[in-house]
Image (cartoon, rainbow, N blue to C red):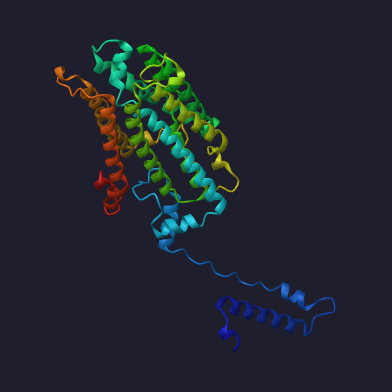
């Protein structure tokens, strides 16, 4: 009894139960028979289990927040994990998993840069290319807008198709198809000399390409599978897109009209920037083929007990007003951004006698370069500071 006073409650209860059982056995038989040992007596003792600790409200909320963390969480912080929770979660990942995730982030940044470069390099010289293809300046605004928007129209028409089929054949396979199609489309556009075939090629490249959405999905699935913090990864993607916004317009404007001596005299003014796009796609295609993992089927792995992500056949998101308003807001922002990026080079390249600026494609490219540096400075240094102190809706 004196010893039990210093025991934990559940151990003391077990000792009391043992003592009562032994006393009852002794009182019934005085001593155990020859065929009944002390171990048999102890086997009859039922030791109570240690009471389970009740979950606190804070534990329940933390577990719920961890299970509901998804794609709609905003990414407004530095590319490097700064919070204590983010650093702790990142450090818990094994070293091998870290290397795999870093490699996938690098490949994703290469895809982001190649796609961003392909889109933005056309900004400075799209009006001049339209005039050269059609051999007339009549209706240059309409035809240059059609040439530029053909790629986006193709992506809009097949984005849901690629999202659905990627659940069946894999994200990596769909991305390889998109990269290969853009490689051939860039090569053919570098050699074409007619307007409508060029429009058709840009439309086909958009129809066969949904790499940006698939790449983000694959990156998110990899980090979710490894239970790692992915904020820094998506912030790094934003930096890669900013770099493509710097390199694309500036190099596109500077290289337009330049020719490569080793290719002969068949070259067009847009051949060199299109061949540069083709080279970027070849590099990204090779890297993706060799090192990009497949992530579409990670949710079915044996040790993954989380709920699978939404598949391409689920329309529930489109029924939520908040998500629809988010799409409208993003579409309006893209409309303003794209409208400026296509209208500004047109006005700048119009001759002065027609109330334009009469700038060359190199001058337009330099102005895009300066603006892109300003955008990167704001996105990396200024915006994260006040976004960390404000709610996302107030930041918008």
**Quadrant hosting residue 371:** top left
**Quadrant hosting residue 326:** top left
Q: Which part of the image, by quadrant, shows the C terminus?
A: top left
Against 130, is 114 above or below?
below
- Residue at (35, 13) in percent of width and height: 195
Residue closer to the observer: 6 or 387: 387
Give the left or right position of residue 199, taking residue 285 as reference: left
Give the left or right position of residue 38, taking residue 335 as reference: right
Residue at the far front in the pictured view:
261
Against 216, is 339 above or below?
above
Whether residue 353 is visible to the viewer of this picture, yes or no, is yes
- Residue at (33, 13) in percent of width and height: 133
Residue closer to the observer: 262 or 120: 262
- Residue at (30, 49) in percent of width and height: 381
Residue 214 image point, x, y percent: 46, 34
Residue 5 image point, x, y percent: 56, 85
């Amino acid at each position: 009894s004196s010893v039990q006073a210093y025991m934990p409650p559940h151990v003391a209860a077990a000792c009391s139960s043992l003592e009562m059982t032994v006393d009852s056995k002794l009182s019934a038989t005085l001593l155990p028979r020859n065929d009944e040992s002390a171990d048999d007596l102890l086997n009859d003792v039922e030791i109570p289990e240690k009471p389970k600790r009740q979950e606190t409200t804070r534990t329940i909320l933390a577990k719920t927040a961890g299970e509901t963390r998804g794609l709609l969480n905003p990414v407004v912080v530095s590319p490097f994990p700064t919070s204590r929770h983010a650093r702790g979660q990142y450090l818990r990942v094994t070293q091998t998993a870290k290397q795999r995730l870093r490699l996938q982030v690098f490949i994703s940044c290469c895809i982001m840069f190649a796609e961003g470069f392909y889109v933005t390099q056309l900004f400075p010289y799209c009006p001049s290319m339209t005039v050269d293809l059609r051999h007339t300046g009549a209706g240059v605004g309409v035809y240059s807008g059609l040439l530029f928007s053909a790629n986006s129209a193709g992506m809009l028409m097949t984005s849901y198709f690629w999202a659905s089929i990627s659940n069946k054949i894999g994200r990596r396979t769909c991305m390889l198809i998109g990269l290969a199609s853009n490689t051939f489309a860039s090569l053919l556009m570098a050699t074409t000399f007619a307007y409508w075939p060029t429009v058709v090629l840009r439309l086909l490249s958009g129809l066969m390409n949904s790499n940006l959405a698939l790449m983000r999905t694959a990156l998110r699935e990899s980090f979710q599978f490894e239970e790692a913090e992915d904020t820094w990864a998506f912030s790094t993607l934003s930096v890669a897109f900013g770099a493509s916004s710097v390199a694309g317009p500036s190099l596109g404007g500077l290289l337009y009209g330049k020719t490569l001596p080793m290719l002969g005299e068949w070259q067009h003014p847009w051949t060199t920037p299109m061949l540069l796009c083709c080279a970027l796609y070849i590099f990204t295609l090779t890297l993706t083929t060799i090192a990009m993992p497949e992530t579409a089927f990670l949710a079915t792995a044996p040790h993954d007990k989380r709920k699978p992500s939404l598949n391409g056949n689920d329309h529930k998101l489109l029924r939520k007003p908040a998500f629809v308003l988010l799409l409208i807001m993003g579409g309006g922002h893209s409309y303003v951004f794209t409208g400026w990026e296509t209208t500004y080079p047109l006005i700048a390249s119009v001759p002065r006698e027609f109330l334009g600026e009469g700038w060359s494609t190199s001058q337009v490219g330099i102005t895009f370069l300066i603006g892109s540096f300003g955008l990167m400075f704001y996105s990396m240094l200024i915006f994260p500071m006040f976004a960390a102190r404000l709610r996302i809706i107030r930041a918008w």
